[in-house]
Image (cartoon, grey):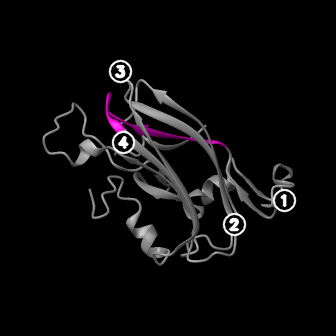
């Protein structure tokens, strides 16, 4: 883990790029006990931003974080079969290095906006407030957990370095996954196009 206890190692650089200044932030958390025989969870989301395309690769790089906290990750007396994980679960593969994850921002989503997402004046954006900007298609985020663990999952959305242009996330369909994934593996967990 790095200094902010983020096992994904995806947030510190982005936070600094945004001048450690989140604005218009919204967040919520929930606690839950992982059912026995369950090693993961999934949820679906859409990410829309008026920051795109003007502010790609800048500090005005709005972000969505889903953060999992497993208290057993910091307990030296625990010895589960798979290491418990606390950190960002909304990381996306870096197109320049698919072994590395990037936090979910307009910069990380830029290739997806240009591909299966919706940009500019496409009819799917009509009436959304994001005309001439971008919305992703639906994505699924996958997290890995330990059966029986009491975890907290939190969602955080913020404008970085400004409070002018809007970013929206739609989150839906949280569900348990028996198979799970290895949280620190970019190709196992994190954000997956649907």
Task: Mark 2 and mark 4 in contact? Answer it, CB < 8 Å.
Answer: no
Q: Which residue is mark 4?
A: 183
Q: Which residue is mark 1?
A: 121
Tell me the crowding category of disc 4: few under 14, some 14 to 19, or many 20 or more residues within 10 angstroms, Cα based.
many
Q: Which residue is mark 3?
A: 37
Tell me the crowding category of disc 3: few under 14, some 14 to 19, or many 20 or more residues within 10 angstroms, Cα based.
few
For marks 3 and 4 on the same chain, the one whose residue lies earlier in the sequence: 3
Q: Secondary structure at mark 2?
A: loop
Mark 1 and mark 2: Cα distance apart in space: 17 Å
Q: Residue at x 60, y 62 (%)?
A: 106
**Where, quadrant-wise, is the N terminus in this rendering?**
bottom left
**Where, quadrant-wise, is the C terminus in this rendering?**
top right
Residue 191 placed where, x, y %?
Answer: 51, 45
Residue 29 placed where, x, y %?
Answer: 48, 48
Mark 3 and mark 2: Cα distance apart in space: 40 Å
Is 140 colored magenta in this rendering?
Answer: yes
Q: Which residue is mark 2?
A: 166
**Numbered disc total:** 4
Q: Residue at x 27, y 61 (%)?
A: 2
Q: Is residue 5 left or right of residue 55?
A: left
Q: Secondary structure at mark 1?
A: loop
Tell me the crowding category of disc 1: few under 14, some 14 to 19, or many 20 or more residues within 10 angstroms, Cα based.
few
Of residue 83 and residue 174, the one placed in the foreground of this image is: 174
Task: Mark 4 and mark 1 in contact? Answer it, CB < 8 Å.
Answer: no
């Amino acid at each position: 883990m790095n200094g902010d206890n983020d096992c994904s190692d995806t947030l510190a650089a982005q936070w600094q790029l945004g001048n450690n200044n989140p604005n218009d932030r919204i967040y919520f958390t929930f606690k839950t006990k992982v059912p026995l025989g369950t090693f993961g969870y999934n949820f679906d989301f859409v990410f829309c931003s008026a920051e795109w395309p003007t502010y790609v690769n800048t500090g005005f790089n709005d972000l969505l974080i889903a953060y999992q906290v497993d208290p057993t990750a910091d307990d030296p007396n625990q010895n589960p079969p798979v290491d418990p994980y606390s950190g960002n679960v909304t990381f996306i593969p870096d197109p320049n290095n698919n072994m590395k994850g990037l936090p979910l921002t307009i910069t990380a989503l830029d290739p997806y906006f240009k591909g299966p997402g919706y940009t500019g004046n496409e009819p799917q954006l009509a009436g959304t407030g994001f005309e001439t900007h971008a919305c992703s298609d639906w994505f699924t985020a996958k997290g890995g957990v330990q059966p029986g663990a009491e975890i907290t999952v939190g969602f955080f959305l913020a404008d970085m370095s400004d409070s002018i242009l809007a970013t929206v996330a739609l989150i839906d369909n949280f569900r348990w996954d028996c198979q799970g994934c290895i949280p620190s593996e970019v190709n196992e967990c994190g954000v997956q196009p649907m």
